[in-house]
Image (cartoon, coloured by chain):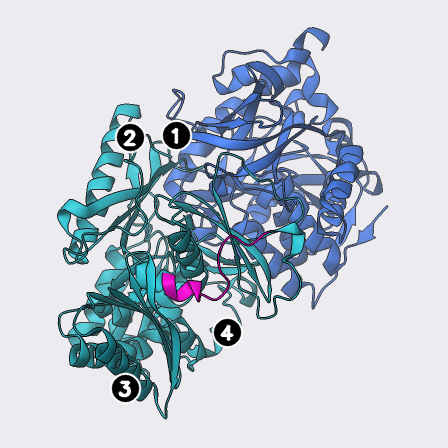
Amino acid sequence: MSTQLTRDDVRHLRTGAHFLACAIDPTAIHVYTDMILQAMEHQSLELTTVDELASDDLVVAVGMVTQGLFIADMPPVGDEFLGCINAMEASLGRRVRAIYPLAAANINGMIPLMVGLQSSLPVIDSDPMGRVFPLISQTTLSIGQVPISPIAMMGVTGEHALVEANSPQRAETLVRALVTELGGWAATAMYPCSAAQLKEHGVHGSVSRMIRIGQIQDSETSVERKFLMLAELLDATRVARARVSHIEGLSRPTDLGLPAQPSSVTLEDESTGQIIRLEIQNEILLVLVDGAIAAAVPDMVTLLNSEHGTVVTLDDVRVGNVVDVLTYPAAAQWYSHAGLDLTEPKAFGIPLRHPRRSHA
Amino acid sequence: MRIGLRLQETSCRSLVLDGRNIVSAAREIHADSLAEALDSALSGIRREFGSGITDITADVGRVLASRKLANVVAVRISPRPPADAFHVAGLPALVEPAVSRTVHVCGGHDMRGRPLAPLDLEAFLTALPGILSGDVRNVAITSVGSTASMDHETRIADAILSNDSEMRISISSDFFSSIFRDRDYTAILNSALMETGEELAANLEAAGRRHFPAATLSFARNDGGRAPLARLAMMPVHGLRPEPAMAILGAATLAGVPDGEVILCADSGVSVGYTRRGLPAANSLIRQGYEASLASNAAVVGSYTANHLTRPDVPSVVADLRTDQKTPPPFGLIATLPSTHDVALVGSAAAPLTSWIDRLETVSGRADLKAVQHRAEEDAQSAAVQLGANPGQTRIIESNVFAMPYGNPGIVRIRVQAAGETSSNNERFLATEPRGATP
């Protein structure tokens, strides 16, 4: 069913998009929210389900791919995504009927709304990650063998490229190299597919889930009540309430060709005495409690300020801070063998298999 | 002895500190003008204490905040101008009216410091006569990627100054934020405050020299430190909101807590901050909700709630600053400091010189990382010495490395704070333990 999004929906989406990706500074989300709210003064915004579309309608993922300068340091001028959609249509010789987020978190959870307003295309309440992963190959569409190409890209300089690659992994390498030279980010349109393919292989309800998370987080209720509501919505568990005792940069070796910046955060749970360790590489990949795995990618992790219940961005974590470590499962597709092959810790260079591997 | 001052439009509040002891409690002088109030306040202190004053630090935040902002020309450097109105960098409502004109110049760098586009200096020089012929004397220059390379900002600044050396110019690379709109906002606000900063510095200099010619004159910074008056004319934005930091530092100073938690019960509510090695724990941004943040190092102050977790091994100071103290402080707090003190003025009097290094570095591994961090620590201590600190009395307060998620491989952010005292001050007010491992 299609829904007209309200301004409040967009504000809640902002909160939810940050909640699901606490590793990244949310400023770009805030900038895009302002743009979307301004644009909504003149135009309505439609969120549709994949069921609303004809099964052979062409749909594409839109999102930023970054490696370098932050989006917030080099804001888009505004024509990049429209340029990508035009290039995609020219390449395929067909009109795009709807767009969907490349990732249902952080900036890529917001961008389709602005693109929808600019292009008058409906935004689909589905995505191929159900969260955000660092690599464009880490999608449920990849698991479903849906081609990633062609990939239309445009940087802030106005320079653009169309990438045809045989595999998502090869596309990742090519796109990442281009992104670096385009300045640090590129607007992209990729994974062109039919609505039927997205319906079969996508993660559904992911935009409305962000809005629901935001509704809870933005509500005037107690921190504990919010936690209970989030626990019910996301099947979340509070692994620990712990104080940050150590932060370490470049804590593990990494492949210098891919976005990485591994770091670790050590915390102490003062009530249980447990030691909690977070392993981070763009996103929080691993939560260890006294050395045992409490959560491992693709599981999702959010840090909350224990006093206020607000999301703690990794940039703001300091020694002495007390945070709640929340973990919750990712979309079901990620716990299949193929899903875990793409996203378990081993895929990020950490020699560990996901605990659910034996049950997958 | 050291004087802490708080200036307002036509008044001056002062306090004198000797070590950690208040020897002259806060007094407020009202006059017809700020210059008169300042002169009267310092004159009174001189009569009482003679020439025993070594340092004078003024909190000028309230004056800066109350003055009308000067008009500013905003120069924005990026590869392309915004294609529509939605993609124009938004400014907080307070500052937006101060921007009389916006000029786009093609240019900018990526995070590796490589040009994204050649600087279109020629086009800017064509527009320059129009900028210089107007009434506006303040310019703010912000370039994409100026945390990695300030080249395009400085070339535009040089072009302006070579045509009119009287222009007041603020460049965004003087303020660390990896977010364009934060640097743009900070440079614009800084530029808009420079004239007031010059005036305040001149007033303070004149009054200080008249009454205490041997004393060091400084202004209070948002991070709980101080900087020489000359910097106030160039970087007024760092003196815009020092009161929260100074209140934390003041309460910690009176309680003798260099590393601990400071809870302030005020009429507006209860807030909490922390001290670390004798200074308030600081963030590099002053956040303002969803709007652009001010890129100025400032004390981290949060609201205190019933969920606040107290750490038993960390000393805690509770200062009751409420006007009406008939009822006990909220949340069952028990004040540990006498309520009569103006703790923010104590903080101003006690503030050390502080300096920051905040920059991007390219590293190839952990050994390299250690080397660049050590170099940044040396640079921060040198910067404190350049502010007037005694080389033997500088110390590192914070030294951190931040990964840059989704950034270029090998590029990290190094952030170091150093503090120091002038040679006239052999006493450190909040003595700290020797520094161990990186916090």
Of the residues under marks 4 and 2, which one precedes in the sequence? Answer: 4
- Tags 2 and 1 touching, CB below 8 Å: yes
B190 left or right, relative to A165: left
10 Å neighbourhood of mark 2: few (<14), some, or many (≥20)? many
The residue closer to the viewer here, A297 or A257, is A297
Disc 1 marks a residue whose amino acid type is Gly
**Mark 4 Cα-neighbour bin, 10 Å: few <14, some 14–19, many ≥20:** few
* Disc 2 residue type (three-letter): Leu
- Do pointers 2 and 1 mark residues of a single chain? no
Q: Which residue is mark 2?
A: B369
Residues rendered magenta in the picture: B334-346
Can you tell which of label 1 and label 3 is closer to the viewer?
A: 1
Q: Which mark is residue B94?
A: 4
> Considering the numbered disc 4 on the image, is that residue within a helix, a strand or a loop?
loop
Label 2 element class? helix
> Is residue B341 in the magenta section?
yes
Q: Position of residue A216 (x, y in %)?
A: 75, 46
Q: What kind of residue is marked 4? A: Leu
